[in-house]
Amino acid sequence: MKSVIASKQFAAAALMTAALALGNQSRAGDFSLAVTGDLLGTVVNDAGIPQMGATVHLFNRYEDLVAETMSGRNGRFAFAGLPAGRYAIRVSLASFLPAARDNIAINAGIDSMLEIHLATLFSDIQVHYKIPTAAMTQDWKWVLRASPATRLVTRYLPGDLANADAAELHPRVFSGTHAMVSVSGGDTGLIDAGSLRGDMGTGFILSTDILGKNQLQVGGTYGQSGTFGPASMGLSAIYSRHGVSGLAEPPEIALTVSQFGLYGGAPQTTPMQPTAAVRIMSLSTYQVADLAGRVHLEYGATGESVDFGNQHVSRASPFARATVSMGRAGEVVLAYSDGDRPEELLAHQSSARAQAPENGAAPVGDDLTAVANALARMPEISSRDGDLRLQRTQSYEVGLSKTVGPRTYAVSMFHEEVWNGWMNVAGDLTGVQANNLLSDGISQTSAYDIGRYRRNGYVASVDERIGDLFKFALAYGQMGGFVRNAGSLMAVLNGKSGVLSERNENVAAANLHAKLPKSGTQIWTSYGWVARGTVVPRHLFVTQNTYLAPGFNIFVRQPLPAFLGIPARMELTADLRNLLAQGYLPLGVNSGNTILIVQSPRVVRGGLNFVF
């Protein structure tokens, strides 16, 4: 019995000794895991000069003050050993506007690097993350060991230089070059396309990066516009600079020149009036800025010069959009535009929308879409008593959106005033004065000026992404539309009385985008509904990704396998719009034929793209 007890005591002592040995070995090896991170930063003015003495306050996610420090001689500061989580920072200095940034992530074992730019007008904070390495300098080690309240001098390298490799420090003159050649055809023209993209024939787009951060995109298109008048052609160039830190990125600049033929009258009118070439030159600027870490501002303007025969019209179209982050409550978006459609806001609305054929131009993939949309640009032109008229739209829009998982809820309201409203008319127009109509010799419809009108509207939508293969959206709302006005048909069409009466109408839409995994086929389908006997002009929303197009629309993009050793990716496209010919408003009968206001003409187009 005593031997059994002695053996048990010996085993317990051995087990305790082993445990102590493991504990000492563990401490000697330092196997503990990091649970804190460091927040490092530098404060400069808008010229890049370091600012000493800036007060820096650090708050936790409950908005409680955690620490306070001041920037040192080189504008640097540091908060060391912060528990992982979300923080906010406020920076202030005399003669400058304060800068603030929320939702700064502090991750275990990772340095959060801040670039704080103070200015008298706009101040902003940019965040970069870096994993510490064994090559950390002694200066950094001393800063992190010391208290941030007493150790103010730090050493900081901008994230772009600290993480750059040899290729980034010495970029090639031209890099990332790719191009596309497109051949398209269809049974419609520019007027039928609703002043969006029509059958432009053959085109090309080239994109390249110059010295790493300067992107230049150039494109051109050519297409014969029928047996009447000059060919349709255009050239466009877009310059942008990316990856530049500071108060705001440099502006994106787009220059476009184009020409196409129009003549007064309708396609059925004989004899036709002499054809005149419409020549357009436009210059657009697009600028962004982040304010106080919560507001993302986009603004710019488009200047246009239009020549039609011996007539000349010039105008400037400013636009702006502000997106305010409300945290968990979502985002509030405010937008304003005056003049032409805010094409730049539509193009930069979201990557998903830029790749969808919602604005009339076919998606081409990669970063070539912007040039395709610029080439597709055609001002909304009409004629009144033989004088060239440009539709002008002044729009105010406000929206609220919130994303919950894969689902996004949004609601938008707008008010717009339109001068020289532009619509399509079709049918027997032989009794209508030719100087009140415009056609391009191919389209089955003609452009008609309905005058000035005001309208309001709202739309609520919900869209959900199902993995990477499907995206489904539903929208419902109400906006101003038109019904036929009483009176003599020829009197209203010849400008002696109003053609249409305004009335608010309900609208609804369902959209689906699907991508087949094996074949790579992409399909966009949409159906837009409006009450029968009503025409509702389309409003292109810039505060949410809602697309309201009348009728049933399908766009298909099918990649093709390469053959014959062609070093290009090929794809077929098919664009079918308003297949059911809905949204046609009959005005009356002329010589036994019905005259129609056409909200969205039926369009059938196809194309073949070679992407290099």
Image (cartoon, helix red, strand yellow):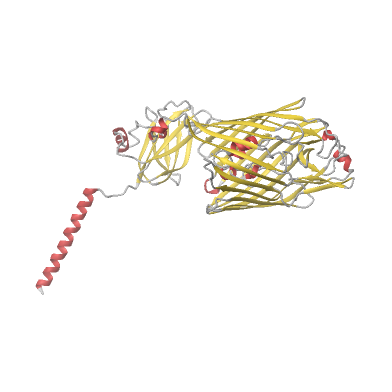
- Location of residue 96 in the rendering, given as x and y in whole percent from the top left corner: 49, 29
Apparent side of residue 471 relative to residue 588 in the rendered image (left or right): left
* Quadrant assignment, res 93: top left
Residue 555 visible in the snapshot = yes
**Going by the image, does 476 lie left or right of 322?**
right
Q: Nearer the viewer, residue 117 or 463?
A: 463
Tell me the residue at 65%/32% (across/down).
234
Q: Residue at x 32, y 37 (%)?
A: 144
* Corner quadrant of residue 229: top right
Question: Percent from the top left, x then y, of residue 574?
Answer: 65, 47
Residue 71, image x, y percentages: 39, 31
Question: On the rendered image, what quadrant is the N terminus found in?
Answer: bottom left
- Does the image show residue 342? no
Identify the image quadrant of residue 374. Answer: top right
Q: Is residue 107 left or right of residue 509?
A: left
Residue ranking furthest to the bottom? 1
In the displayed structure, would residue 309 be above or below residue 6? above
**Total count of labels:** 0
- Seen at 73% across and 38% down, the residue is 417
Residue at the far left in the pictured view: 2
Task: Give residue 178's position: percent from left, percent from top.
Answer: 52, 36
Which residue is more in the foreground, 272 or 99? 272
Q: Residue furthest front?
A: 564
Left or right: 14 in relation to 492:
left
